[in-house]
């Protein structure tokens, strides 16, 4: 028997895990678990936000091949491949961008996204009305802000996702079934709003309930460029973030202890990663916006029970995960999947892609026609970013890990820049033929 459990933790910063050098006790169990497997030091998402990163994680493709982040009808998820190979498959998550609407239910025997049922015509109409009201409010900053103030004042704030304890419990119940299983678990607790349970909050923060709600409200305002967070507030935000991570760590512990109790831990490939990073104003913004700096796209990646020897310093892209899983299981991967098997090939570069609107950092208007592409190519030493509005950026990551000194206009580095640009353009041109009906008139080589 060979099981696979893919654990993705939304918006998890690799730098806030103890096993990646963080000084606070946010992840004691993950830290301990990482010593039993491989902790990759150079793993990267293909995009800086959820709907753009998951096509690579589950379907082996980049987001530019999707239509408004809806997976193409001919896309092949790893769940479908494993289902055809007699695996029982299940997904447990509560992220609205990973639902049936976006095509992520394909190949799953159990697909639990915890959303309101739309089985009856009546329910369907009610939900359509709710969605229209929500959309109207979100596009009217005054009304949306007023609603949030009233909600926070009455302390009736309801989290937009299910807690880790619910997801873990349901995943464990599924794992009790006989046979080979593939389980994808996506935890949302580390994603904002950060409203940690008191047991975990008090380990990191002294804020009371009202202060926690007010701080989250300021985060939303700051994300919409309506407020500038103070340094003290940024520290408080990270404290809440750390408390949520500590909570998730506890439930990953419960999951792993269950596997060990059932004597299936050693027979289970376990992958722990994140779909993207999170910014606390290191590059001028809070939360995660459409940027391709390491704080936005560098992610933790821990693989347990891989057995084969793999160098933890190798470059890895999350688009490599589907092929790697099938390679581990000795199953032939689909030819259409991009990426490489971590077990067979070493990477020299990773590619990232994203959309943004005119102010470059926002991606929430991705459904508009006026959207622009930003792409990046990264080696261990260099990163080249090409944005259709901002132009070119080049960073020496060994000397400038925080990507603060743009070297794109240095004549002495012109050859390095052009070589990276050429490699990126070669890839982009291949993709351009596949996305020409989605994005018209875009010059991917424009600087």
Image (spheres, rainbow, N blue to C red):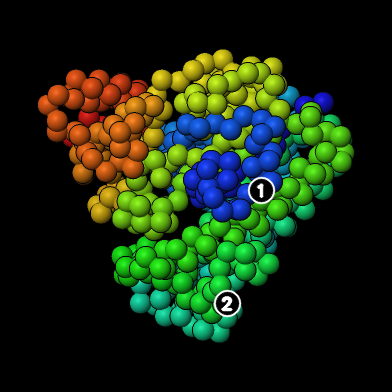
Above or below, comparing residue 74 to residue 202 in the picture: above
Q: Is residue 320 left or right of residue 178?
A: left
Q: Residue at x 35, y 38 (%)?
A: 401
Residue lying at 57% horizontally and 29% vertically, measured from the top left: 321
Residue 299 or residue 102, whichever sits in front? 299
Query: Residue drawn 68% across and 41% down?
Result: 32
Q: Which of the numbered marks, if any, corresponds to residue 317? A: none
Residue in the foreground of this view, choosing between 388 and 152: 152
2 and 1 marks in contact (CB < 8 Å):
no
Q: Residue 178: x percent and y percent?
A: 87, 35
Of the 4 image quadrants, the one containing the C terminus is: top left
Res 162 visible:
yes
The span from disc 2 to disc 1 (Cα, nearest Å) is 26 Å
Residue drawn 30% across and 21% down?
Answer: 423
Instruction: For mark 2, give the secondary structure.
Output: helix
Is residue 245 depicted above or below 110 in this figure?
below
**Which image quadrant for residue 80?**
top right
Residue 28 numbered tag: 1
Residue 247 location, quadrant: bottom right
- Left or right of residue 83, residue 194 in this image: left
**Mark drawn on residue 209:** 2
x and y percentages locating residue 121 in the rendered image: 64, 63
Q: Position of residue 417 (x, y in %)?
A: 22, 26
Name the residue furthest left: 411
């Amino acid at each position: 028997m060979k099981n696979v459990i893919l654990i993705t933790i939304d918006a998890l910063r690799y730098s806030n895990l103890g096993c990646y050098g963080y000084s606070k006790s946010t992840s004691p169990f993950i830290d301990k678990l990482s010593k039993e497997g491989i902790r990759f030091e150079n793993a990267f998402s293909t995009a800086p936000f959820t709907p753009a990163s998951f096509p690579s994680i589950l379907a082996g493709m980049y987001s530019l091949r999707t239509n408004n982040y809806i997976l193409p009808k001919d896309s092949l998820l790893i769940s479908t491949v494993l289902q055809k190979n007699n695996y029982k498959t299940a997904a447990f998550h509560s992220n609205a961008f990973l639902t049936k609407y976006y095509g992520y239910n394909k190949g799953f025997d159990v697909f639990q996204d915890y959303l309101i049922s739309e089985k009856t015509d009546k329910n369907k109409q009610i939900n359509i009305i709710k969605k229209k009201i929500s959309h109207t409010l979100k596009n009217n900053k005054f009304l949306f802000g007023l609603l949030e103030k009233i909600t926070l004042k009455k302390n009736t704030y309801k989290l937009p996702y299910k807690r880790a304890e619910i997801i873990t419990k349901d995943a464990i119940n599924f794992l009790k079934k006989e046979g080979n299983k593939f389980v994808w678990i996506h935890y949302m607790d580390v994603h904002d709003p950060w409203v940690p349970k008191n047991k975990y909050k008090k380990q990191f923060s002294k804020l009371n309930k009202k202060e926690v709600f007010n701080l989250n409200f300021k985060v939303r305002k700051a994300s919409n460029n309506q407020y500038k967070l103070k340094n003290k507030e940024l520290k408080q935000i990270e404290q809440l973030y750390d408390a949520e991570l500590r909570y998730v760590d506890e439930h990953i512990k419960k999951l792993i202890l269950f596997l060990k109790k059932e004597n299936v831990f050693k027979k289970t490939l376990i992958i722990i990663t994140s779909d993207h990073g999170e910014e606390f104003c290191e590059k001028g913004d809070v939360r995660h916006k459409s940027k391709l700096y390491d704080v936005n796209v560098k992610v933790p990646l821990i693989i347990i029970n891989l057995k084969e020897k793999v160098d933890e310093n190798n470059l890895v892209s999350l688009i490599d995960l589907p092929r790697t899983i099938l390679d581990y299981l000795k199953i032939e991967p689909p030819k259409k999947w991009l990426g490489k098997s971590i077990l067979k090939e070493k990477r020299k570069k990773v590619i990232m892609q994203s959309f943004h609107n005119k102010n470059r950092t926002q991606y929430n208007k991705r459904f508009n026609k006026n959207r622009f592409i930003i792409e990046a190519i990264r080696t261990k030493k260099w990163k080249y970013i090409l944005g259709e509005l901002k132009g070119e950026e080049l960073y020496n990551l060994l000397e400038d890990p925080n990507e603060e000194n743009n070297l794109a206009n240095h004549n002495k580095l012109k050859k390095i820049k052009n070589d990276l640009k050429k490699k990126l353009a070669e890839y982009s041109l291949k993709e351009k033929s596949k996305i020409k009906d989605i994005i018209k008139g875009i010059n991917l080589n424009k600087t």
